Image (cartoon, rainbow, N blue to C red):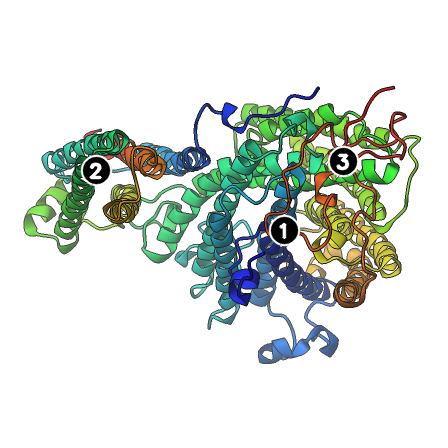
Amino acid sequence: MNKAIQLNDRFGAATTGKLGMWLFLVMDALTFGTILIGGIGLRNAADVWPTAGLILNVPLTAFNTFLLICSSFTMVMALNGVQKGDRKSFIKYLALTIGGGVIFLGVQVYEYTHFILGSNELGVVLSQSGFSGTQFLPFTGMYGAVFYTTTSFHALHVLTGVIYLSVILTQAVKGQYGSDNYDRVEVAGLFWHFVDLIWILVFTLIYLL
Amino acid sequence: MHSESFWRKDIFSTDHKTIGKQFLFFGIFFLLFGGFQAMLLRWQLAYPGQPVPWWLMGFLYEGTGGIIDPDGFNRLFTMHGTIMIFWAITPILIGAFGNFLIPLQIGARDMAFPTLNMISFWTFFLSGVVLLLSHFLPAGSASGGWTSYPPLSLPGGGIPGLGQAFWTLSVTLMGAATMMGAINYIITVIRLRAPGMTYWRMPLSVWGLWLTSILNAIFVPVIAAGLIMLLLDQLLGTQFFVAGRLAAGGGGDPLLFQHVFWIFGHPEVYILILPVWGIVSDLLAIYSRKPAFGYKVTSICMSTIVVLSSIVWGHHMYTTGMSPLLGKAFMFLTLLISIPSSIFFFNWLGTLWRGSLHFDPPMLYTMSVIWVFGLGGLTGLYNATVTSDIYLHDTMFVVGHFHYTLAASVLFGGFAAIAHWFPRMFGRMLNPLMSKIHFWGTFITLNLVFFNMMVVGYAGQHRRIYNPSEYEFLQPLADMNVFITYAALVLGLFQILYLFNFVWSLVKGKVAETNPWRATTLEWTMDYPIPHGNFGEIPQVYHGPHEYSNPNTDQDWAPQTVEIKSS
């Protein structure tokens, strides 16, 4: 007698959607990995590389990092809420998660504007680092190229996450999810945690080191 | 049965069979487009600087007095390579047959993510539109070669206009579509196999397509990152891949792009050929009426190559000044690939050995893959070995070699697959007489073209040179170049016959019976047209895909859904 395959046996109880998301995250990690490792290689080859914290505002971004970690926590709470059937706390924490993402993006826009518009103080700092001009731009040496590419590619992910979670929130308000139906919330959460995790690498490599 | 509107059913369809057909038509269009560019290239190499005749659409070159100028030549080989790899082979083998075969052969109702599948096709379509539009840019399309190496492909590299940026954008979009497809194929095979369809009972076509998708999932994200950086260099003025005089503020490393490109680029050749290996292994069994020789070994060998292919990219870069030790390591790993390749190659011969061979058109195409892939594989050894590669690098020998493996093997694999599954896709048979004429015409001329390319390459002719008659040492090869060109033109003519056959059979071909080839796999178990959802009831699978000439069955084949009782 031939044994029939039980679909649910493979990869535990993971749904098809969850497997798909995990595979996507692996692929996305490879893209990020290439950008980050390429950045390390280019940094080693570059003539000028400013000291950490000279141009970039580390305290401001540390706050942003903290914010993103908090939003991961609220995402866990949102999932916890929907699993328990507590719709109110589910929606509340999901909205807080989205809010965290929006503020994160806002801070990054502020940071970018500050650099792109430029100022005399920025010019002083830039000249200390071996660059000319009063603006910090994507073509301000390899430093600018690596900084803008890495952070903007990550910001694109945060933006995607915010839109993704907003769709989930709209569906949640319509009452689409409950304690027996929360797979898509969990899958969206996976993406959000991934974006958070990547940011910790970006923060360490770009801002701190 | 619920009825769907034309838009939902035929255009924005989520049915994997319709999407597969869309990819097929898309791929055939680009195959003809890229093939026509090859004819123009050959014209220039045979008759450098002479006006393109009217029957090769000489009016395209009115602006330059009918001749192909050097920039135009660069644009031709760039677009020919890019189109054939990304917009012809990829959609036909992976897009069309991946979509059509995977769910049908494993007994699934559709892909795991049907909507993603539809988005994948339309992203692919968009990428093709961007690529085609780039031909109409005022300064012309990309001309930096299909490898698009910086700094040549960057603004300071001498190529005017936005052609290179359009190239990068369209390949990036293509990559996005490929990644969506890869997720779909991998998860579908993992999750949606019918009861009883274990991994070791999957047809080898599914094995090939699945392994291809795994390679796609790992390496397309890598090139995507490289392409994003290249695009920023081209449009925003960053300097990731700029060095030397062109680098204003610091500069980066052009070699970094080569590494990123070939980390993807070498697996890419296996991405393109793995589906063919699988399809050939299956078809040989069907038309020899024998179980595939060493089924498990073949799939293990293909999996081994998947692993090895990811650590050999350096053999494309022997001449970049890499450490000899590193070169040796890459050479050793590359040559190692010949072991698993030879094993399944002999498995193919083992399948044929003492089989009851049926020379239907699909079998002819399939058997020719054995020949052209054998030649392509053997000539690869010379390119993999550092000492001979330094001489052969960047010559027509390399061009001949990869056309044998990619163009010839993959093309014949594609022809075989189309001829074999045409009745399943369109309910009619591909006309066998026209197919046989097309087969012999293509097989003979194709060998004349690509073998002689290797000969002129061995004699020293470089690839991508505009005018071979300018070099004294290449002048004795002029007749050979003319000969190759005429062979190529005849090859092109036979493809027009193929197109005619395809369209004619689509409309007027003999209506096919349900299982004309007496094959055992699941896609032949239902009547045409196959409904959305494929199976009335998900079938139970009892044995592997190649139960032919089993003494315990009445007929010489047993479908996978029929239990074989040993007597």
Would residue B418 be visible to someone looking at this image?
A: no
Relative to B12, residue B247 above or below: above
Image side of residue B325 versus residue A19, left or right: right
Q: How many marks?
A: 3
Q: Which residue is mark 3?
A: B281
Q: Position of residue B344 (x, y in %)?
A: 75, 29
Q: Nearer the viewer, residue B248 or B73?
A: B73
Residue B493 lies, with reference to residue B81, above or below; the image says: below
Place of residue B6 in the rendered image (x, y in percent of width and height, measured from the top left): 55, 66
Closer-to-camera residue (B127/A100): A100
Measured from the top left, where is residue B5 in percent x and y?
53, 65
**Circles 1 and 2 on the same subunit:** no
Give the label, 3 or 2, closer to the camera.
2
Q: Is residue A166 left or right of residue B305?
A: left
**What is the crowding at mark 1: few (fewer than 14 residues within 10 Å), some, or many (at least 20)?**
many
Q: Amino acid at mark 1?
A: Ala
Q: Marks 3/1: CA distance?
A: 18 Å
Label 1: which secondary element = helix
A115 to the left or right of B185: left
Q: Which residue is mark 2?
A: A87
The reply to whether residue B388 is in sight is yes
Q: Quadrant of residue B470?
A: bottom right
Checking the image for residue B96, the label placed there is: 1
Q: Amino acid at mark 2?
A: Arg
